[in-house]
Image: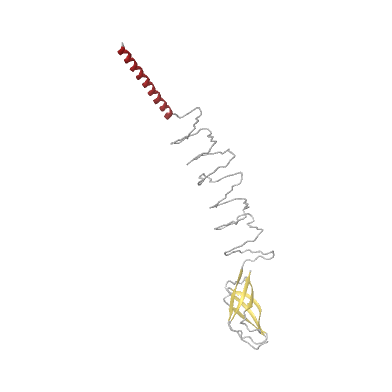
């Protein structure tokens, strides 16, 4: 009798152990094999997902959320606060566009490989620096400023208009040279002033003699007769000296078209 009770107790213990083991195995299997949880999950600690997590509805996070890498085909941030990005934000969509209904504010250095806009307002008091080429492709192509336009390097234009009047498409300046020419008193002789680099027949030219031209000679006319050449008419007034040779003389010239 006593022996049968011992065997019965052992059988009860074995049955209980088997039941507990099966329950644990079924619970673990149910968790690892689950694909759908119809109720809420609440945790007081961290929620760690080592694989991919697919959410068929909305994920609402009321606290701070750190995502090492998050990928989505469509995200909506309805919270009225600020989206903080500590690293780099890259747009890899088919258009690559970032659209905002408000103001895009950049407090640090901003590099724009290609920027296109129909209207830009820069209210910062510091300078706008363009390291490459800035091209205006608007309907008018005009750049307006209430201050000064300062060009440190070369400024080039073929359509300069200053305060109204005629349009200037070219300006050249420099020196040209005449050979020693004999001009009798009270006569006028044509002399070619060569090495007038940049001068073309379309330019209107102005010349002035340097101090090496004797005082009784006067330039009465100047014209751009050929490329890099200015034709001069030089008169010998006959006073205050009787000199009839001009000497090898350089002239300053200014040409405009």
Give the answer, above or below, for where 158 lies relative to 178. above
Q: How is the image coloured?
A: secondary structure
- The furthest residue to the top: 1
Give the answer, above or below, for where 151 lies relative to 20. below
- The furthest residue to the left: 3
- The furthest residue to the front: 2
Residue at left offset 62%, top offset 73%:
254
* x and y percentages locating residue 185 in the rendered image: 66, 87
Q: Quadrant of the C terminus?
A: bottom right
- Closer-to-camera residue (148/237): 148
* x and y percentages locating residue 166 in the rendered image: 68, 66
Q: What count of labels does the image hold?
A: 0
Describe residue 165's horizontal placement relative to residue 95 as left or right: right
* x and y percentages locating residue 144 in the rendered image: 65, 57
Residue at left offset 35%, top offset 19%:
13
- Closer-to-camera residue (239/180): 239
* x and y percentages locating residue 216 in the rendered image: 66, 84
Q: Quadrant of the N terminus?
A: top left
Quarter of the image for residue 243 reads bottom right
Describe residue 175's horizontal placement relative to residue 6 as left or right: right
Describe residue 155's horizontal placement relative to residue 34 as left or right: right
């Amino acid at each position: 009798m006593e022996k049968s009770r011992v065997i019965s107790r052992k059988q009860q213990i074995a049955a209980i152990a088997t039941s507990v083991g099966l329950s644990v195995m079924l619970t673990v299997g149910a968790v690892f094999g689950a694909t759908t949880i119809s109720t809420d999950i609440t945790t007081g600690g961290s929620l760690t997902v080592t694989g991919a997590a697919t959410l068929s509805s909305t994920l609402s996070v009321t606290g701070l959320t750190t995502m090492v890498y998050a990928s989505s085909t469509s995200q909506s941030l309805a919270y009225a606060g600020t989206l903080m990005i500590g690293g780099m934000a890259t747009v890899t969509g088919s258009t690559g566009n970032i659209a905002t209904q408000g103001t895009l504010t950049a407090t640090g250095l901003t590099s724009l490989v290609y920027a296109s806009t129909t209207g830009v307002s820069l209210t910062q008091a510091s300078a706008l620096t363009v390291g490459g080429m800035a091209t205006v492709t608007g309907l008018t192509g005009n750049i307006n400023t209430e201050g000064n336009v300062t060009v440190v390097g070369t400024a080039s234009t073929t359509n300069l208009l200053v305060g109204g009047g005629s349009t200037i498409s070219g300006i050249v300046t420099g020196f040209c040279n005449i050979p020693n020419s004999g001009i009798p008193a009270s006569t006028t002789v044509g002399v070619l002033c060569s090495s007038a680099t940049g001068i073309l027949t379309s330019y209107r030219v102005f010349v002035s003699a340097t101090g090496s031209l004797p005082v009784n000679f006067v330039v009465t006319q100047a014209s751009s007769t050929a490329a890099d050449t200015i034709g001069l008419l030089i008169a010998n007034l006959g006073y205050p000296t009787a000199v009839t040779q001009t000497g090898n003389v350089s002239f300053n010239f200014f040409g405009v078209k």
